[in-house]
Amino acid sequence: MKKYDIFLFDADNTLYDFDKAEAHAFEISFRNYGFHYTDAIREKYREINRQEWDKLEKGEISKDDLQTSRFKRLFDHIGVECDAKQFNDNYLFELGKGAFLIDGAREICELIVSRGKKIYIVTNGILATQTSRIQHSSIKDYISDFFVSEFVGHQKPHPAYFAYVLSHIGQIAKDKILIIGDSLASDIQGGINAGIDSCWFNAKNADNHTGIAPTYEIHKLNEVAQFI
């Protein structure tokens, strides 16, 4: 099996359990505002949020617009009067505390670093939130650096995003770099665009009907050990 020196990990649902962090932050925010909370409301939010992120990735809205519109649409749907921007700020603050890890994340990070290899995080998340989550997490000392699209100025899978990342991790041959992530559209396509090998973290055993072909596919993070 081919070995790598640099591991570019996606953050959400690759190293960090975003679904758990989102559920926790959403429920706390709703209760902070005295709103009635149900799992059905959160599922509706997730549906709206996915739609808004799709618009962002297509360049139809800005990230600032997304953060307000997702909650405005939700509140309109459930008939609640609330300042969507203020609620979003509270939600992001709570989300920033959610440094829950995917099973095996700490162990694989520890193993990679113990072998003298380096880990970088590559994420499309919101800068303040991702920075907080990474700094609150138990794996922060294993991370050499992290690159958030909001700061970089481009999102995965844009080649300019990866050009920025590669220019900041030193003179490393591309064949020694592996990107690992759960998203075919951003992580795997991003690796293809950047000319580096990719590993699809397919934890849910989903079918791939996209035509985007990863170099490797794994289902548990401990399978990354074969590449170290």
Image (tube, helix red, strand yellow):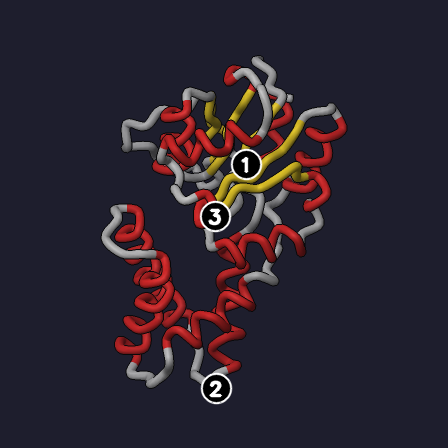
Tell me the amino acid under the disc marked 1: Phe
Q: Label 3 sits on what residue type? A: Phe
Q: Earlier in the sequence, mark 1 or mark 2?
A: 1
| Residue identified by numbered label 2 | 34
Q: Residue at x 60, y 16 (%)?
A: 3
Q: Residue at x 55, y 51 (%)?
A: 17
Report the amino acid beneath label 2.
Gly
Q: Residues within 10 Å of mark 1 (few under 14, many from 20)?
A: many
- Residue 177 in percent (x, y) is at 54, 22
Vertical placement of 118 versus 85: above or below?
above
Q: Earlier in the sequence, mark 1 or mark 3?
A: 1
Residue 151 numbered mark, or none:
3
In the rendered view of the protein, which quadrant contains the N terminus?
top right
Q: In the image, is residue 77 above or below residue 48?
A: below
Pointer 3 and pointer 2: residues touching (CB < 8 Å)? no
- Residue 34 in the image, given as x and y percentages of width and height: 48, 86
Q: Which mark is residue 76?
A: none
* Rendered view: 151 above or below 188: below
Indicate the quadrant where residue 79 lies. bottom left
Marks 1, 3: nearer the viewer: 3
Which tag is nearer the camera, tag 1 or tag 2? 1
- In percent of the image, x 49 and y 69: which residue is there? 91
Is residue 220 shown above or below 67? above
Residue at image position (51%, 80%) is: 31
